[in-house]
Amino acid sequence: MLERFLDQIGEVLRLCEDTDGILVVNREGIIEYHRIPLNSYWCSQDTVGRHILELYPELDGESSTILTALRTGRASYNVLQDINNHRGERVLLESTTIPIVVDGRVECVVDSSKYHTIDQRVIRGGEGGGLSTLDRMLTEDPAMLALKSRIRDVAGLDSSVLIYGETGTGKELVAESLHSEGGRAGPFVSQNCAAIPATLLESLFFGTEKGSYTGALTRKGLLEEADGGTLFLDEINSMDPALQAKLLKVLEEKKVRRLGGSRDIPFDVRIVAAVNEKPQKLIREGRLREDLYYRLGVIRLTLPPLRERLCDIGPLADYFIEHYNRKLHRRVRGLSERALRLLRGYAWPGNVRELKNAIEGAVAVARGERLTVEDMEEILAGRLGGLNRPPELPEALRLEESFSLTRALDSYERELLSRAMQQAGSISQAARLLGLSRQNLKYKLKKFDL
């Protein structure tokens, strides 16, 4: 008996190594202990002494892995549970649940969960005030002005749209404007495909019926949620190719069947999708199905990076300064000329989003009426002093008779990736520095064995 108990404890300790939170629940279903980070998406801090169903009322004895383990005495591993957390936000829990059995009786259960925030927005008809419009697309750049005109021309159509633009260029703003300027009365639903692990995306897209798998509840999928409106799928290239094929079939048939369901549900949705790398490159690398590309790209829109629209940096910076003056209760009057020249000389790998974040930081610490070079250098120091100064040329870049451009570019890219990881310390921060999605950076790190 002692050996089995020690085995159970050893298994529990292994759970503690990679988790977002741990609950210990007694055999009555009451929480006896928790280890949850502050400001957790998972649940609130005042959980001890409460019943598990008080915490998650949408679960029951069948869908809760904790109550199932208490009833059966069997462990479960990496089970998905679809819940609403204490903030009312939808969260997917990936739970491993271990019962502690003493003398043949379950005394308690230890539950270790990772949470996945869905990064989804649903704006219903009549709530259009929350959506961007073309009036909010600030630009003096000819290419952007042409894009705005193109959006007006196609907004009222039902044809699907594929947007290409680097990370941070404003693809969601374009998608929202297409919906706002169009005539669809239904909701605007936005989903970042890179935010959800591949194993969870299928249930999110197509919906679930209760009991389709352990922990499953009856939920509408994205296509049902967006019925009569627009579904925006950001970073669709991060979706598994097998799921891309299923999505293509559903879009062709215009009906969807929930996981575990027995009937087909028709839908009327305009699809707007976005990629943050050139589509032809994604197709060559097998990360975007060619047939799905043609299905989505009936209308194709391209967003230029901020480094190609230098005339917009001043107006955008002024707009963000005013925004953060109101938010942070500051009185910054604008940029000095030297500060503006500095911003125009920076490459902005994170594009408009990076500019917005930089201005927020500068407004927060500004010492005078205007943002100075010193203010901006303080915010951009890590970026200007690191990634934007090319590293010394690796040996592969030195021109010799055996020189290969492909090898040289690979060597240079590997060096940049390595320095970014050293400087940032985490994949998420390195992705922000490089202006890449987290998914794309992970792909490149694997490619170069870093």
Image (tube, grey):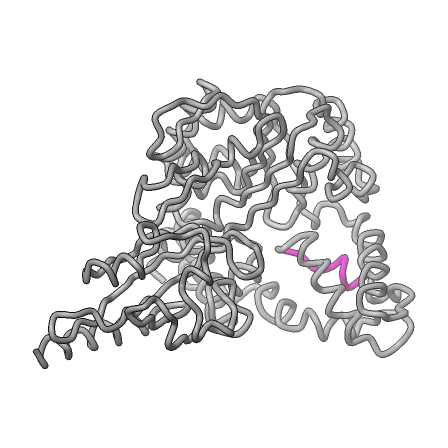
In the displayed structure, would residue 288 be above or below residue 25? Answer: above
Q: Is residue 346 left or right of residue 209?
A: right
Q: Is residue 242 left or right of residue 142?
A: left
Q: Position of residue 198 (x, y in %)?
A: 38, 45
Residue 95 shows in the view? yes
Q: Which residue appears farthest toward the bottom when viewing the image?
A: 2
User: In the rendered image, which quarter is residue 141 located in?
Assistant: top right
Residue at 84% across / 55% down in the picture?
319
In the displayed structure, would residue 223 be above or below residue 358? Answer: above
Q: Is residue 23 left or right of residue 129?
A: left
Q: Position of residue 67 (x, y in %)?
A: 30, 59
User: In the rendered image, which quarter is residue 332 located in?
Assistant: bottom right
User: In the rendered image, which quarter is residue 321 located in?
Assistant: bottom right
Of residues 297 and 44, the one nearer the viewer is 44
Residue at 48% across / 73% down in the picture?
37
Q: Position of residue 123 (x, y in %)?
A: 66, 40
Q: Which contiguous range is marked in magenta?
A: 341-349
Residue at 73% across / 39% down in the picture?
127
Of residues 63 and 186, the one nearer the viewer is 63
Question: Was residue 97 drawn as part of the magenta stretch in this picture?
Answer: no
The quadrant of the rendering that contains the C terminus is: bottom left
Of residues 409 and 416, the one nearer the viewer is 416
Q: Is residue 375 left or right of residue 402?
A: right
Q: Position of residue 103 (x, y in %)?
A: 11, 75
The quadrant of the rendering that contains the N terminus is: bottom left
